[in-house]
Amino acid sequence: MVLLGSIFSICRDAAGVAGHIFAFGLFLSPLDTFRRVIRNKTTEQFSGLPYIYALLNCLICLWYGTPLISPRNTMVMTVNSIGAVFQLAYILLFITYAEKGKKIKMLGLLLGVFGLFIVIVIGSLQITDLPLRRNVVGILSCASLVSMFASPLFIINLVIRTKSVEFMPFYLSLSTFLMSISFFLYGLFNYDLFVYAPNGIGTMLGSVQLVLYCYFSRVAREESREPLIVSYA
């Protein structure tokens, strides 16, 4: 039993490290957008809402990973700490280059995120029953992750309608899939339903995106081919 526990612990940590590596693919994916924003000194028609949602998700999951809520979930805490820093940096850049109306809106949403996070932290600490506290924050974390993973459903629908993968970057879909499956395994080896359940959903949605990308890319290549010889007989 001790040996089995050690193997599970090693597998858990390996999956967590892999999840950190693949998470950087997600965290770095908006860099091209912000290079354009900085170069043009305007946010154009880009929306800052995805970064607001991502920051809130990272903060809730970060709180769930702390020892005050769930022990043995350090990897969940660290990856979401890094993610929160990235999202906050993107939001501050967005505010810097946005028009006045957008600046005020984004500042209000940012304050709202921090306010909601403080309410969650203080409210959960009022629950003295530790298993109940873990379940409450775990449900919030799970709901937040599922909503984030469900957001690409619009893109999936767009890809099917247009039969084009133009708006679904391959490496972003790949990073989502690899990060999800890594933390799905991390949650399994850690016996944590609130980690493996939402990441299992993320794995399925990520695999759907990859399958669609491969299928419609192949269709586009076949349609773009012209016959070498055209017969008019």
Image: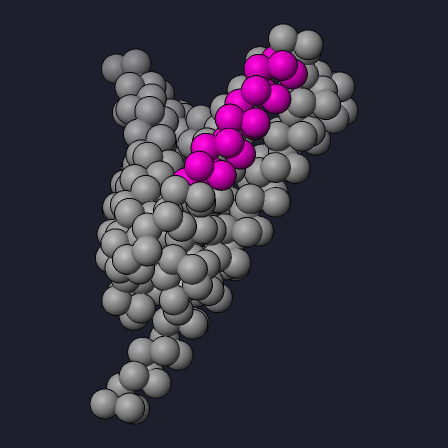
Q: Which residues are magenta?
A: 102-120
Magenta-drawn stretch contains 103: yes
Q: How is the image coloured?
A: one colour
Give the answer, above or below, for where 37 lies relative to 137. Answer: above
Quarter of the picture containing the C terminus is: top left
The residue at the point 36 percent across, 61 percent down is 70
Question: x, y (%) of residue 66?
Answer: 45, 59
The residue at the point 67 percent across, 22 percent down is 95
> Taking the image as drawn, is residue 117 in sight?
yes
Using the rendered view, name the quadrant where residue 108 is placed.
top right
Is 111 situated left or right of 183 in this image? right
Is 215 situated left or right of 55 in this image? left
Marker count (numbered): 0
Give the answer, above or below, for where 101 lies relative to 188. Answer: above
Toward the top, the furthest residue is 101
Magenta-drawn stretch contains 115: yes
Of residues 230 and 154, which is closer to you in this image? 154
Using the rendered view, name the quadrant where residue 139 is placed.
top left
Question: x, y (%) of residue 116?
Answer: 45, 33
Of residues 84 and 219, which is closer to you in this image? 84
Question: x, y (%) of residue 99?
Answer: 68, 11
Helix, strand or loop for the magenta stretch, by majority? helix
> Taking the image as drawn, is residue 146 in sight?
no
Quarter of the picture containing the N terminus is: bottom left
The residue at the point 49 percent across, 39 percent down is 118
Question: x, y (%) of residue 3?
Answer: 30, 91
The residue at the point 44 percent across, 43 percent down is 122
Of residues 217 and 172, which is closer to you in this image? 172
Is 126 situated left or right of 191 in this image? right
